[in-house]
Image (cartoon, rainbow, N blue to C red):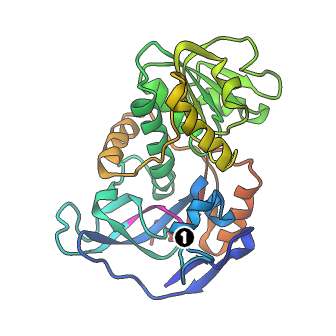
């Protein structure tokens, strides 16, 4: 089968299209024929090899042999391993897998769910990692309640549009922070207020918020906390500022009531089923920036590396009409 593997750490030229062996599902696993994949922040950090601990998953000192990139997928179940009872051949599914940028992939049955009925495969592939991050950050770590004021810093990237919509679904009054070119898009998905960061700094004497979900780390931790209510909470959800910022956030959380700890979201069947309800009732819709064919995956990584993606970048692996 054709797949995109990572040959080293650096820029997009470490991604290569290669013919490799089709995987076989083990116990509790599902073989999926991939129709679409999406690239999340984890793939960008994995390409760079930073923060450094990510190399313990991908490989050190270089990526594992035939390491297929991509975590989020949507496709059709080809076959199932022993003890899998929730899925059968022909089911349309989406979720987290081991290497989505290939014609076939393996997923644990506990990390996938049936695809939302109202989404295409491309749209479904945009959901898992980013939407689970937004859901767990706001619902579990931020404990957002109806009527609270929530600010999403970095509202137009991969996680941001899901965070805006999920915060609205939780009953919050949502303020979104983005660049000028993304203001209308963010308004269109339900933000009550939009701050154009090229014109205004949300940390400088404006309104205060109950929860700030920070997807870009564009300010110091103390600056961001200035925009919080006394009992508010800052949810750091970004690796852009590097390991130092992440460690500082984790350490500060021990002593500062407003400072939440960085977290790593988990993609589980339970979380995907919760998202299905939001998606199928129209409360959450994926925002897709652009789509690349599998052969152009290196170009997709190059675009992601520029840092201006609006919503999700999709890899179309198979034709949905096939």
Q: Nearer the viewer, residue 2 or 140?
A: 140
In the picture shown, does residue 14 fall above or below 155? below
In the picture shown, does residue 104 fall above or below 111? below
Q: Nearer the viewer, residue 195 or 136?
A: 136
Residue found at x 56% / y 65%: 316
Q: Position of residue 284 (x, y in %)?
A: 46, 36
Confirm whether residue 236 shows in the render: no
From this viewpoint, which residue is outermost toward the right? 199
The verdict on residue 213 being magenta is no
Looking at the figure, which quarter contains the C terminus?
bottom left
Residue found at x 51% / y 47%: 130
Confirm whether residue 196 shows in the render: yes
Q: Position of residue 153 (x, y in %)?
A: 64, 31
Residue found at x 57% / y 43%: 287
Q: Position of residue 60 (x, y in %)?
A: 59, 74
Residue 179 falls left or right of residue 44: right
Crowd band around label 1 with a 10 angstrom C-alpha radius: few (<14), some (14–19), many (20+)? many
In the picture shown, does residue 161 fall above or below 74? above
- Element assignment for label 1: helix
Residue matched to label 1: 58
Residue 199 falls left or right of residue 80: right
Residue found at x 34% / y 57%: 111
Residue 147 falls left or right of residue 205: left
Q: Position of residue 32 (x, y in %)?
A: 37, 71
Q: Point out the stretch of residues depicted in magenta.
A: 70-75
Total count of labels: 1
Please name the predominant secondary structure of the magenta segment in the image: strand
Q: Nearer the viewer, residue 135 or 274?
A: 135
């Amino acid at each position: 089968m054709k797949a995109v593997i990572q040959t080293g750490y650096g820029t997009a030229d470490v991604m290569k299209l290669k013919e490799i062996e089709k995987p076989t599902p083990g116990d509790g696993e599902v073989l999926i024929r991939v129709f679409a994949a999406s690239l999340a922040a984890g793939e960008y950090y994995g390409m760079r090899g930073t923060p450094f601990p990510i190399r313990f998953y991908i490989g050190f000192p270089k990526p594992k042999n035939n390491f297929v990139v991509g975590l989020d997928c949507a496709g059709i179940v080809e076959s199932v391993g022993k003890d899998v009872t929730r899925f059968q051949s022909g089911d349309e599914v989406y979720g987290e897998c081991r290497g989505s940028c290939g014609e076939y992939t393996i997923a644990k049955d506990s990390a996938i769910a049936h695809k939302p009925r109202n989404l295409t495969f491309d749209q479904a592939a945009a959901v898992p990692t980013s939407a689970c991050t937004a859901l767990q950050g706001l619902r579990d770590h931020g404990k957002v309640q109806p009527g609270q004021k929530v600010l999403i810093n970095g509202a137009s990237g991969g996680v941001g549009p899901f965070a805006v919509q999920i915060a609205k679904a939780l009953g919050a009054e949502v303020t979104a922070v983005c660049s000028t070119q993304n203001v209308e898009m963010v308004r269109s998905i339900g933000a009550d207020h939009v701050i154009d960061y090229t014109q205004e700094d949300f940390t400088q004497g404006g309104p205060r918020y109950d929860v700030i979900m920070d997807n870009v780390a564009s300010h110091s931790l103390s600056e961001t906390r200035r925009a919080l209510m006394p009992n508010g909470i800052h949810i750091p959800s970004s690796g852009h500022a590097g390991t130092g910022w992440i460690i500082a956030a984790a350490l500060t959380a021990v002593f500062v009531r407003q400072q939440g700890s960085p977290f790593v979201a988990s993609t589980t069947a339970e979380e995907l089923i919760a998202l299905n309800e939001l998606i199928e009732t129209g409360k959450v819709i994926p925002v897709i920036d652009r789509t690349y064919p599998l052969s152009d995956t290196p170009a997709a990584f190059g675009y992601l590396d520029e840092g201006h993606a609006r919503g999700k970048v999709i890899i179309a692996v198979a034709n949905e009409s096939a």
